[in-house]
Amino acid sequence: MTHGVLCVRPITNTWALHKEALEMHHCANGYLARCLDGTWRLFSVLTPAGKRMATISIERDGLIWTIDDVRSFANASVSPAMRARWRRISPAVMVSFDGIRL
């Protein structure tokens, strides 16, 4: 999925989740259990050149998916503009885009 000049890649396996956490220096791999039980899905936000810019988490409550958080390198907050940009995307679109299934 491409949004503007950024690409969104679903994190679909354990190795991809571990790699995201290592390269972004954050704790995304700490959510493995939630991903496995189907209540969370994670996505990597990249430039067209492949540089990681952020990680998006979406959370399921019953049948409803919501964007939980958008984090940058070392768990830093993303800019307000970037946060607003991702909040406008329907989590349902992201879920249908085949998010994490470990």
Image (cartoon, rainbow, N blue to C red):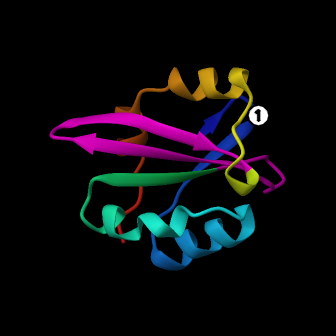
Q: What residue type is labelled 1?
A: Val
Dominant secondary structure of the magenta stretch? strand
Q: Mark 1 points at which residue?
A: 5
**Which one is nearer the viewer's eye here, 88 or 71?**
71
Q: Is residue 6 above or below residue 82?
A: below
Q: On screen, 49 above or below 22? A: above
Q: Quadrant of the N terminus?
A: top right
In the rendered image, the quadrant that contains the C terminus is: bottom left
Q: Is residue 65 left or right of residue 16?
A: left
**Residue at horizontal 40%, vertical 53%?**
41
Magenta region includes residue 14: no
- Check the image and name the residue furthest to the left: 62
In the image, residue 31 lies at what x, y percent?
A: 43, 64
Question: Quarter of the image holding residue 77?
Answer: top right
In the rendered structure, which segment of residues is drawn in magenta?
45-72
Q: Residue 86 location, x and y as percent?
A: 57, 29
Residue 56 at x, y percent in the picture: 54, 45
Tell how many labels: 1
